[in-house]
Amino acid sequence: MQQAAIGLIGGSGLYQMAGLEDVQEHLVDTPFGRPSDVLVTGRLAGVPVVFLARHGRGHRLIPTEVPYRANIHALKQFGVRYLLSFSAVGSLKEELAPLDMVLPDQFIDMTRRRENTFFGQGVVAHVSMAHPVCAQVSNVLARAVAEVAAQDPVTLHRGGTYVCIEGPQFSSLAESHWYRSMGASIIGMTNMPEARLAREAQIAYATLAMVTDYDCWHPHEAHVSADMAIANLMKNAARAQQVAARAVAVLAHERPVSEAHSALKAALITPPETWSTEAQARLGVLLA
């Protein structure tokens, strides 16, 4: 299996990675089922990477149907230590305008129908989610956006809270105002439990969120629709591809040490030497 320390997950509108060379597709099995689609390996900016379309090519999976555990487990099988997530989001703040980019550093998880841990069935672990985003990887993304913006202006906002809802419906007006009252900055449907599982897999995770709309709270802007969100995301898609290539090059050169890389050191309650054979097969890769 071709190994790649850097993984990329593409969200709505980002179903493939332009500029990828030496492309190979891999149909992967995991103890948690099949991932969203084939994993695509290749070289981006000369660096080995592995790419996965979160919703599947052709956008076949609603957010609840995304096999988050299988996705993260499969990426870990390929040796991923750094994971760049690209996501479409709605804005919950006036200053975060459509076509802006955001690097959130916190999450509020409002999902209710998703398996959100690899553990259980005889193995207990409690990872810290106090700081769910890797600051080093987020910094690399910020630098990459700045490089792209020098040629193709874009506004980047650093920090903020991403509230993740179950979907697939967009928010009611009351819900949108409620999320704003929480202090949330942006709203999406997919970064949870993705970020939780990446931390359990000891992968340094950060997301670049691309604003497509003002959800439905804004009194003077059109309420979000799927057409609106996808149209604006496609405008940012080429820019996101450029950001990815620059971030990958920096990560490959600097290889920052992240606290995520040792997340299980203080989190595992059940000693690995006591795990059953089945648990070893299911979870062993997470310890790598």
Image (cartoon, helix red, strand yellow):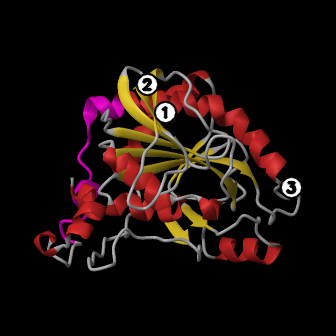
Disc 1 to disc 3, C-alpha distance:
30 Å
Q: How far across and how far down the image is residue 267, in percent? A: 23, 72
Is residue 189 in view from this perspective? no
Above/below status of 144 relative to 173: above
Q: Is residue 204 inside the magenta stretch? A: no
Residue placed under numbered mark 1 in the picture: 244
> Of helix, strand and loop, which one carries label 1?
helix
Residue placed under numbered mark 2 in the picture: 44
**As shown in the figure, which amino acid type bears the numbered disc 1?**
Ala
Are dots 2 and 1 in contact, CB under 8 Å? Answer: yes
Q: Earlier in the sequence, mark 2 or mark 3?
A: 2
1 or 3: mark nearer the eye? 1
Above/below status of 53 relative to 254: below
Q: Earlier in the sequence, mark 2 or mark 1?
A: 2
Disc 2 to disc 3, C-alpha distance:
38 Å
**As shown in the figure, which amino acid type bears the numbered disc 3?**
Glu
Q: How far across and how far down the image is residue 61, in percent? A: 65, 54
Horizontally, residue 37 falls left or right of residue 257, namely right
> Of helix, strand and loop, which one carries label 3?
loop
Counting labels gives 3
**As shown in the figure, which amino acid type bears the numbered disc 2?**
Leu
Q: Which quadrant would residue 172 be assigned to in this image?
A: bottom right
Residue placed under numbered mark 3 in the picture: 221
Horizontally, residue 84 falls left or right of residue 167, namely left
Which segment is the magenta one?
250-266
Label placed on residue 77: none
The crowding category of the residue bearing disc 1, from other C-alpha atoms within 10 Å (few below 14, some 14 to 19, many at least 20), is many
Report the residue that reaches farthest toward the front.
277
Q: How far across and how far down the image is residue 144, in percent? A: 46, 32
Q: In the depicted view, which residue is nearer to us: 100 or 37?
A: 37
Residue pictured at 68% horizontal, 50% vertical = 60
Q: How far across and how far down the image is residue 277, in percent? A: 20, 68
